[in-house]
Image: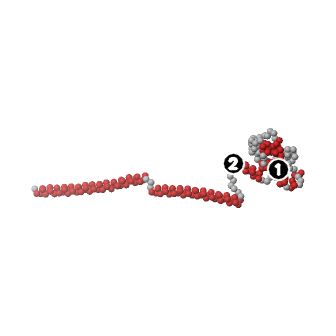
Amino acid sequence: MKMSDNGENSKKIKHTDVDKKKSSLVINYEKKAEEKKVEDQPKKKVKKRRKKDQNAPSEELEEFKEQLEQLKGIKKFFKTELSKSLLTGIKLFDKINLKYFGRRRKKDKQKTEADIEVKKTEIVEEKFTFTSLISLNVIFTDNKKIPLYLPAKQQIGMYAQNDEVLYSATIGKIFDVLRETAQKLKRSPIPEQGKYEGIPLNEVFAQISEKEVLEFLFYVKRFPSKYIGKNYRFSESFAAWIMSGTPDK
């Protein structure tokens, strides 16, 4: 009986040892499982954060954008500075060109009435001589067909030698002819175009100036073909020029 009791006791001891071992293994397994859970949790969070960070712009990208903006600013600065330097260079070149060569850059401009008037005054300021018309065989007469100045072959004395004397004598005769014509005009025509548009011809003749007479004489000098060898009355040729609109070309 004692032997059987001992055997049972030994069996019980073995079972308790096995149970202890099993329980320790379970506890160890559970601890390891919990540790793994703890380890796995931050890894998952890190992965999520990384995904979020991938969508957000990186620091390198931000630096690149800043550098790009700086480059744009530098580019604008150089553009303005280069344009300024080019303009100053062109102005300097123009000054040098004008000073040493007397040339200006030509600019295309439309002809205005003001430009034409300036050209007319420049023509008037040019010295006119009746010898220039005599050399072209252009002779004007008074209303009685007497020449206001003689052809070259018939000139003698002071008139042949001095342009100023010839000019002052002839211009005086022209004013006498125009005043005479203004008084004789009963039905005075009225120009419809040109410088004297709307002014009766007798008033034009009565109020004419030396400058205006010279405008016509310069016109004759530049376009003499229809006056050469004709010996026209000055009053008739001058009236025709006014009625046609005082052309200058």
Q: Residue furthest left?
A: 1
Where is residue 201 shown, x and y percent of the image? 78, 42
Q: Nearer the viewer, residue 12 or 196?
A: 196
As measured in the structure, the alpha-carbon distance from the residue carrying label 2 to the one carrying label 1 is 36 Å
Indicate the amino acid at tag 2: Gln
Q: Residue at x 56, y 57 (%)?
A: 77
Residue matched to label 1: 171
- SS assignment at label 2: loop
- SS assignment at label 1: helix
Q: Residue at x 85, y 46 (%)?
A: 141
Where is residue 1 shown, x and y percent of the image? 10, 56
Q: Residue at x 79, y 53 (%)?
A: 127
Give the label, 2 or 1, closer to the camera: 1
Q: Nearer the viewer, residue 54 or 245?
A: 245
Q: Is 194 positioned to the left or the right of 74 in the image?
A: right
Q: Is residue 194 above or below residue 105?
A: above
Q: What is the basis of the colouring in this image?
A: secondary structure
Q: Residues within 10 Å of mark 1 (few under 14, many from 20)?
A: some
Q: Residue at x 84, y 51 (%)?
A: 169
Indicate the amino acid at tag 1: Ile
Q: Is residue 83 above or below residue 195?
A: below
Work out whether residue 138 can be spotted. no
Q: Mark 2 or 1 closer to N-term? A: 2
Q: Quadrant of residue 74?
A: bottom right
Where is residue 19 shown, x and y percent of the image? 21, 55
Circles 2 and 1, Cβ within 8 Å, touching? The answer is: no
Residue matched to label 2: 110
Q: Nearer the viewer, residue 32 or 88?
A: 88
Where is residue 129 shown, x and y percent of the image? 82, 52
